[in-house]
Structure formats: C-alpha cells, structure tokens
Image: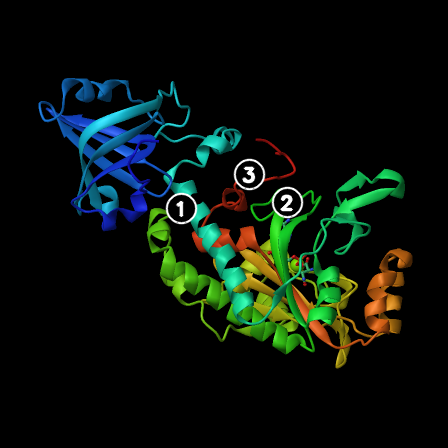
Amino acid sequence: MGTMARIYIDELDKHVGEGVQLHGWLYNKRSSGKVRFLLLRDGTGVIQSVMVKGGVPDAVFDKFDALTQESSFSIRGKIKKEPRAPGGFEMELSDIPHVYQIAHDYPITPKEHGIEFLADRRHLWLRSSRQHAIMRIRHRVVKAIRDFFDERGFTLVDSPILTPAACEGTSTLFETDYFDLGKAYLTQSGQLYAEASAMALGKVYCFGPTFRAEKSKTRRHLTEFWMVEPEVAFNDLNDDMDLAEDFLEYIVQSVLKDRAAELKVLERDITKLQNVKKPLPRITYDEAVKILHDKGLPFEWGNDLGGTDETVVSEQFDRPVMVHRYPSEVKAFYMKRDPENPKLALAVDVLAPEGYGEIIGGSQREDDLDVLLERIKEHKLPQEAFEWYLDLRRFGSVPHAGFGLGLERTVGWICGTEHVRETSPFPRMIYRNTP
Ligand code: 4AD
Ligand code: MG
C-alpha cells in the first residue's frame, strides 16, 4: 500500500534520518501528558512511534484513541536512533495515512492467560512476542539442518508420508482408507526409504512431518512432528555418533549466533547452550543403568529408559549425552546387533540436558538378508510389505547407519519451553487437533 517503497522494521538501521512508511498492527500504546506513543509490530519487529499534540495535525493526533490492540494501520515519519526504545529505533510520527481495521476486544491481553485459553486461540497467540521468538528460532534450526547436510554433500530425498506398512512398530499408526488398495498409514519415520535413497545416492537426508498415534500425554509428545533423518552408506555406529555430535554443535551454535535477541526474549540461560560443542560424552546403556542404580533408582536391566531415567542420566552432564548399545529387545527390528554381544543393538539415543530427554534416535542398520528376515518374523511384521526393503540387502548390501532428530523437541530444548507444543505453529496432540 502507498507509493513509498515497502520497508520493514528489521531494516530500519539503513533508514536512520529518512522518512518512511510502515504497516503493521498495534502492539501497545501509552500516553504521557501531550505525548502519545504507538508501538507498531510488523512481523519483523516492534517500533515505537511518537507524536506530540500540536506537532501533528489534530486529525492525526486524534486517531490515537481509536487504535486498539491488534488494530491494523500504517504510520509515516522520520526514523531516529533511540537506544531506550524497544528495537533501538524510534519514529517521529508525522501521519497515520491508513487504518486498515480497528480490532474490537482482542482476546489475548498482556495479563496472564491459562494455557488452554491460549491454545484454543493459537492462531492469535502466534502474534505474541514469545511465540514470535520461538517461531524465529524454529526457522533458524530448520535452516541450520538443511545447511549442515547441504554443505556436506548430502542429497535431500524426501520419503513418502502415505505408506503401506509400519516402520517403528505397529502400535502407533494412524490409518486411512486407500482406494482399492486397502489401508494406508501416515509415516512414523522416513528411514526405510532413506535407506533405499542412501544406496542410490550415498549420503542422503529426508526432512518432513511424521506421525505417531501415541497415547502419551507428556510434555515431549506430539502426534505430528517434524523429523530430519540422515542416512549414510558405509557408516557404522561410531560414524553415526560423529555425525550426530557435529550436527548438534552446528545447530546450537547457529542459533546462538543468529538468534541472540530471540533467546533474550525467552530469557533463556544461554550458558547451558554454549557448552554444546564436541566431543559430546558417549556412554553405554550399561553405564547409564549404573548411573541410575547409583542414584538409587530401581531400574531393571533390559528396559528402555523412561522420561525420568533420561533426565537423571542427562543431569550428570553439562551437554547432550549419547547413550549407545541398548538391549535389542526394546529397539526396532532394523537395528543391527552388536557382534560383540548380540543382546545389544548398535543403537544410539542422544539425550538433551535439563530434562528435555531424547532428541535423537539412531542406529547402524542390519545389512544381512537372513538376519533381517528373522527380525521381521520375530517382530511379526508382514514380510510382503518389506520385500522392497529386503531388496536393499539382496543387491549390493553395505553397512550403513543413520538417525532421526525430532525438530520440536530440539527447538523446545534450545528455547527452554515448558512443553513441546509451543514449538509447533499448530500443534497436534491426542487431546487437541484445533485450530
Ligand atoms: O527414536 P525415534 O522413534 O527414531 C526413529 O523414528 C528412527 N527411524 C530414526 C532414524 O534412525 N532414522 O524418533 C526419532 C526422534 C526422537 O529422538 C524424538 O526427538 C522425535 O523423533 N520424536 C518425537 N517428537 C515429538 N513427539 C513424539 N511423539 C516423538 N516421537 C519421536
Ligand atoms: Mg527413540
């Protein structure tokens, strides 16, 4: 709108001393004597604009009263540096050329609201400064994920979302009718297809939404979440852990570098994030069990680590910890067994500090046809559905490994959110699929 070039608040440093026009929504306003402050947000930031009675035409000055929280309008005026103002700049307001709409009774006010109240209004809640900061960090994490793999010669090969069979066990599948072909399932993981892609392209990753019909109501669980899954031909478990630690360092350091302002909005203690540098500690499952026993927890060897167990183990370290070689009984069918001890799987989980739990799950894959056939039978999976996957072991089978990193859990940890739901723009959980 308007004849001037479109300018955004995050580029005002290039326009100090100039007259500009900005479009946005009323973030806040206040008055003091003859002075009126309108705080406008435009999605890239917030700017304070100021006008004084007598300094602008009365018709402009009088618009102040009608402008309510989230009303949409444009402002025009000269930009100056103002270290005390939010964002560091201030506009000397000369005109309010256009009011798009006056908002009536915006439901989210600066007072405290309950989480369900806010979640019901997620489409509006996203406008608040805290949610804005989280979305900006999420975007930066996504970019770091793509940059990391792209810079290292990986090819992005997307896995399908509608699939004919389970990947991570049958209990958590969303099912749908698929024309004359029977049932289809929303994918739990793109891994099996990433393995096929790795045999074609060597180093690959897939990155997309995945679905779990999990009945878990914890602060770490969503039914729809994004997962990035690298898969590398000729990698073993150690290579897989090397890749995971480089990857985590890269993600966290990128956010620290480019999203300092957002972390500040979230009041995140960044000293905890600055530690995220390799080498990350590596312990075996057996060592993790010993930690639990030393802490007096009644943990039984052979079980998977639960949420509390993960928290206790991770509290022993000042950065993410890699736990490897879990009992194969509690892990997926495709994981290769440790040749040194077949009771163990060549698996790794990376546990985030501060109680955020598992953010990465990965493994070296079973590459022997006969062993894999046995596993499929043990896990009572329909062999026909896996024939294509077995072909990867029939035609030039090689050692290979990969992992999956959950985007929302990673963002939740970096942002220090209470619950993973805040890291998804429109989260899906067992008790919520709206808005
Ligand atoms: O450990 P998971 O189930 O691993 C896999 O799906 C493998 N196929 C990955 C691979 O090797 N290519 O899930 C991987 C990660 C977890 O560590 C966690 O970060 C995230 O996905 N995750 C969830 N995030 C949010 N809500 C849930 N319900 C999640 N389940 C897993
Ligand atoms: Mg896992």
Horizontally, residue 326 falls left or right of residue 90, namely right
Query: What residue sits right under mark 2 in the picture?
Result: 224
Secondary structure of residue under mark 1: helix
The amino acid sitting under disc 2 is: Glu
The amino acid sitting under disc 3 is: Phe
Query: What residue sits right under mark 3 in the picture?
Result: 426
> Residue at the location (51% across, 31% down)?
116
Residue 418 percent location from the top left of the image:
48, 46
Q: Is residue 241 above or below residue 211?
A: below
Residue 245 marker = none
Could you tell which of marks 3 and 2 lies nearer the N-terminus? Answer: 2
Residue 288 percent location from the top left of the image:
60, 69
The residues bearing labels 3 and 2 have C-alpha atoms spaced at a distance of 10 Å
The residues bearing labels 1 and 3 have C-alpha atoms spaced at a distance of 15 Å
Could you tell which of marks 1 and 3 lies nearer the N-terminus? Answer: 1
The residues bearing labels 1 and 2 have C-alpha atoms spaced at a distance of 21 Å
The quadrant the N terminus occupies is top left
Could you tell which of marks 1 and 2 lies nearer the N-terminus? Answer: 1
Q: How is the image coloured?
A: rainbow
Query: What residue sits right under mark 1 in the picture?
Result: 133
Q: Is there CB contact under 8 Å for labels 1 and 3?
A: no
> Residue at the location (30% across, 24% down)?
98
Disc 3 packing (10 Å; few <14; some 14–19; many ≥20)? some
Residue 395 percent location from the top left of the image:
84, 74
Nearest to the observer: residue 74 or residue 38: 74
The amino acid sitting under disc 1 is: Ala
